[in-house]
Amino acid sequence: MSNLETVFNIAAVERDTGLSKDTLRVWERRYDFPKPGRDANGERVYPQEQVDKLRLIRRLLDLGQRPSKVIPSTSAELTTLLESYRATSAPGTPAVVEQELMQYVKLHRSGELLAALHQGLMKQGLQRFVAETIAPLNEAIGEAWVRGEIDIPEEHLYTEQVQNILRGAIGASTTSNGRPRILLTTFPDEYHILGLLMAEATLVPEGASCLSLGTRTPLADIQSAAVGGKFDIVGLSFSVAYPARHAIEGLVELRDALPTHIGIWAGGAALKDKQRRLPGIRVVTDLADTLTALREWRSVHST
Ligand code: B12
């Protein structure tokens, strides 16, 4: 390795690729890739082209490819494979507003993003803003990520600003003592928070009381918070990235752990078409269905 070549230590590679140090070391042993050199202290250093290949691998794993298949391939082969995914997620014709918001995300213009989101909220009102602007924008962000147009920092920037705007608007439309009382959270491996916030933004203007614990709550804590806080419903969110089998197992376990008078609503793309496998749980397919679930609950509990 020439001295002039740029190299990265393992912490930098972890940060850049999202692959943990442990994963990098295991792959090195198991697949003979990556193949780091060593610095003067004997610490691993990775050349740029290996880091580039690791980034391609990370993206393909996120799309469901297996390490044993992608790691032995060349960077050129991986790029071709990634292209085939990109071709199937070609951009539709996003609305002008969506295009403008996407540009702000890509250019890290968070102030302008926030202002444009705020304007959309003012024009549409909270429920329509969430259903008609944020839901399609999530899709567009996810697709731009598959095409390699944005990366984790841009996704974070996007999520932060959407959270800011939704939290403010939810706070402003909260009424006290509304029913049902809904506890919102996700299971421990689910980091995606926007589904929860979108559900809350849909329910609160209807007079429901929501308490969000944010993401990643252990099942035992969900159970004790729901019982202790006298909630009517526990609402959980599962993004499309969440393995449906785990979601079902966890939900069945939670159903058993909760008294029957506490309902469970489970939403998010991971549970599409899974209602049949979840007796005693209301699978919510989208935001319109969230309102239907609310109406159902109120009609059953009005007496
Ligand atoms: C923002 C984002 C991130 C951010 C999240 C930040 C945060 N704190 O939330 C970061 C960068 C951290 C991230 C991480 C990851 N992400 Co991500 N992410 C997204 C993005 C753009 C939005 C996610 C989101 O919150 N969606 C909102 C959800 C939950 O919407 P929904 O499932 O359609 O649900 C709707 C309704 O059902 C209803 N609803 C949802 N929940 C509930 C609950 C109740 C009670 C009710 C009533 C209603 C309701 O509301 C929604 C409105 O339409 C999506 C794109 C997308 N299409 O969703 C990708 C996406 C989900 N992520 C993806 C991936 C792969 C990942 C990572 C694995 C990447 C990685 N290697 O790190 C990790 C996984 C982290 C984890 N363990 O959870 C993929 C999943 C691909 C797949 N098919 O599996 C997606 C689809 C991007 C893509 N196109 O490839 N991500």
Image: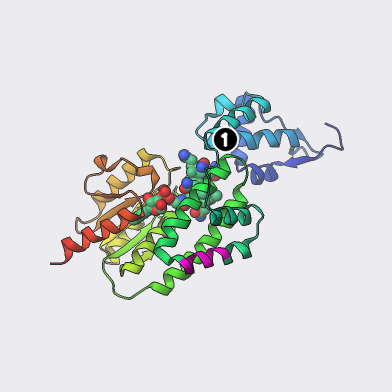
Colour mode of the rendering: rainbow
Residue 216 versus residue 13 in the image, above or below: below
Q: Amino acid at mark 1?
A: Arg
Percent position of residue 54, x then y: 65, 35
Percent position of residue 276, x then y: 24, 40
The quadrant in which residue 259 appears is: bottom left
Which residue is drawn at the image coordinates 77% and 37% (left, top)?
A: 42
Q: Is residue 186 left or right of residue 263?
A: right
Q: Is residue 283 left or right of residue 173?
A: left
Residue 232 versus residue 59 in the image, above or below: below
Q: Is residue 206 magenta?
A: no
The magenta segment is 116-123
Residue 213 can be seen in this image: no
Q: Is residue 104 left or right of residue 175?
A: right
> Where does the N terminus fall, quadrant-wise?
top right
The quadrant in which residue 71 appears is: top right
Outermost residue toward the left? Answer: 303
Q: Is residue 120 magenta?
A: yes
Which residue is drawn at the image coordinates 59% and 56% (left, top)?
A: 100
**Secondary structure of the magenta portion, mostly?**
helix
Task: Find disc 1 in the rendering and name its residue.
Answer: 86
Percent position of residue 208, x then y: 30, 67
46 vs 280, nearest the viewer:
280
200 vs 113, nearest the viewer:
113
Percent position of residue 242, x then y: 42, 43
Which residue is drawn at the image coordinates 69% and 36% (left, top)?
A: 52
> Where does the C terminus fall, quadrant-wise?
bottom left
Residue 22 versus residue 168 in the image, above or below: above
10 vs 146, nearest the viewer:
146
